[in-house]
Amino acid sequence: MSTRIVIVYHSEYGHTQRQAEAVMTGVKLVSDVEALMLTVEEAKDQWAELSSADAIIFGAPTYVGGPSAAFKEFQEASSAAVMRNGYLWRDKIAAGFTNSGTRAGDKLATLIQMVLFAAQHGMHWVSLDLPPANCSATGSEHDLNRLGFWLGAAAQSDVDAGPEQAPPKADLLTAEHLGRRVAETTLRFAQGHPRR
Ligand SMILES: Cc1cc2nc3c(=O)[nH]c(=O)nc-3n(C[C@H](O)[C@H](O)[C@H](O)COP(=O)(O)O)c2cc1C
């Protein structure tokens, strides 16, 4: 049975979708791992797909200091579809990413909310594992993790730039790093502990 990762995300205007695609690129760098991208709207009809995955990577734009309402709706729907049916996501790997208009933008609150969501499902959270960057005389806007997050991948998209321009390359490469790390971790975990 191959190792499978699903990326579930919401993006109203396309910027977080660019980040999700970069996460997917990172996952695909690892052999023997299959990946699937689902919007939250699609995911709500594909609970079986999610429950058979080894890892789920969550992505949402930060709206009003937290995950967007559409992402929250998906999270709440998982209560009946996943928890009430026997905690079907228990012991899966989890990770997350978020994008917003400003550099800080209260994105940390979104990532923390995703960690809590994963914990409520009994999942194992994978951190970003990149040193914080762009914080010294030798740092620059081109550094991976230029925004300085640990819990997951963060991106910033200027509000007057379309998704073809934003988020910038450094943030997309940061997202790619997360995808690769989750795939490598999932592979190790799945080999040691076959899916129940
Ligand atoms: C309703 C709403 C609330 C927002 N709240 C925040 C916020 O709290 N922090 C922030 O930095 N940006 C905020 N933004 C900006 C978005 O996070 C930003 O435009 C993002 O790139 C949108 O992602 P999307 O294109 O994937 O929908 C908000 C945008 C909207 C529409």
Image (tube, grey):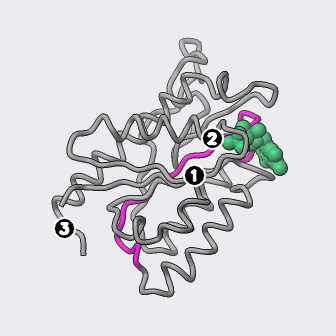
Q: Quadrant of ligand 1?
A: top right
Image quarter of residue 92: bottom left
Q: Is label 1 or label 3 in front? A: 1
Residue 66 seen in render: yes
Q: Label 2 sits on what residue type? A: Thr
Residue beneath label 3, please? 194
**Is tag 3's residue or tag 2's residue first in the polypeptide sequence?**
2
Q: In which quadrant of the rendered image does the N terminus lie? A: bottom left
Q: In which quadrant of the rendered image does the C terminus lie? A: bottom left
Mark 1, ligand 1, within 8 Å: the answer is no
Residue beneath label 2, please? 16
- The CA distance from mark 3 to mark 2 is 32 Å
Q: Give the extent of the magenta segment.
A: 88-107
Residue 107 seen in render: no
Q: Are marks 2 and 1 in contact (CB under 8 Å)?
A: yes
Seen in the image, is 47 located left or right of residue 1?
A: right
Residue beneath label 1, please? 9
